[in-house]
Image (cartoon, rainbow, N blue to C red):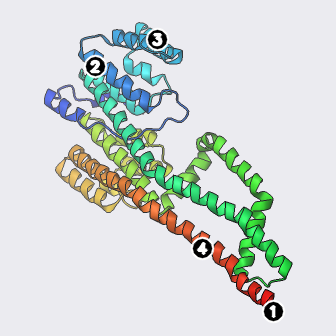
Amino acid sequence: MGFKLDQTLDKTTTEQTRKEGVDHWLKKEITILGSFFNSKKKEGYYSELAILIKAGLQLREALELLAGNQKKEKLKDFYTQMVMELDKGLGFSEVLKKRKEFTEYEYYSVEIGEESGNLSEVLQELATFFAQKNDQRRNLVNALTYPLIILCTAILVVVFMLRMVVPMFKDIFEQNGVELPAITQLVIAISNIIERYGVLLLLVIAILIVLRKSLVRMESFKRKWDYLILRVPYLGNFMRLVYMAQFTQAVSLLTISKVPMLNSVQMAKKMLRFHPIQDALETMEGRILKGVSLHQSLMGNHIFDHKMISLVKVAEETNQTEYIFRKLNEQYVIELQQKSKMLSTIMEPVIIVVIGFFVGVILVSMYLPMFRLSSVLGG
């Protein structure tokens, strides 16, 4: 990053300011693909570690106790190795920095806690950070579960009709030489495609599911996917709010800790695993290096809305950057919670209407020739 925390952290900061800073730690999502030490484990890890240190144990003793409480050998070894590295004279933040399971945000936060003497409070806020991330993920899963069940069931119904019902009508029409309307011919053509290539399609879907993590790790694929999601109505704005909440929380925290704005932007860029905002922050970083003001560096990118730009301008004029970013974060979090609740409410009727439309088209396309068939049989 090109800076030292001991140069950016004000040693004369009062205890009140430090406690105020701890109250506003980042609360949102950091995604670590393929890590066994996921956010759920981190929530318990930081929470237990904070409790033990507050109870008077030394950091090494606390880690040793946590290692002894682990049932899985992999986790026990993971904690034991950290204890061994502490014994070698490394600081706790250095221990975290050496491991891919921890992000820059985590080890720099711990380093700030070590420098300021608030390590237990820092660890507790990291626990809150991951607890809220897990809550957000659970809420999102709960919101999407029922609509996705409806969607999968409806797709199966449509596929069943195309694969089993439509061919039956098709045979009847062919046997009686009925002239088919265009819509019926289209539905029969789709049915033939499913009959011929259905197994292949299922195989491709299964392969994509198996390889999804590998695809996500591909930078080019991940970039295109992120920008595609951003263009999806409602979902795109929802994802933008998720990362705006993270960004504003990060800046609020880091300005409290006296980290310069440029370094805060650099850290946020590495923390946020979403290409549209990473690109926006890279542009922002370049403008700040050229001497452009903070609010002007935000302009010209649709990721940053007018509300943020206006309030950041006020923050610069009043020297209240930390306060303004904290308030922006609160607003984004509230908006995000509202949209999370609305997501399932919106998806359910939309899915029902769309699937109902397809089922209706299939039924109409099959019944239209029946009227001609009745006249043929009657003649």
Q: Amino acid at mark 2?
A: Ile
Q: Which residue is mark 4?
A: 360
C-alpha separation, residue under disc 4 versus residue under disc 2: 60 Å
Judge by depth and name the residue closer to the eye, 367 or 266. 367
**Placement of 379 over or under 218, stated as above or below:** below
**Placement of 375 over or under 74, stated as above or below:** below
> Residue 359 shows which numbered tag?
none
Q: Earlier in the sequence, mark 2 or mark 3?
A: 2
- Residue 361 visible at all: yes
Q: Which residue is mark 1?
A: 379
Q: Earlier in the sequence, mark 1 or mark 2?
A: 2
Q: Nearer the viewer, mark 3 or mark 4?
A: 4
Q: Earlier in the sequence, mark 1 or mark 4?
A: 4
Instruction: Quadrant for the N terminus, please.
Output: top left
> Residue 51 shows which numbered tag?
2
Q: Amino acid at mark 3?
A: Thr
Q: Earlier in the sequence, mark 3 or mark 4?
A: 3
Residue projecting furthest to the front: 378
Q: Which residue is mark 3?
A: 80
Please give the name of the residue rendered at 48% of the width and 49% of the height, measured from the top-left corner.
145
Mark 4 element type: helix
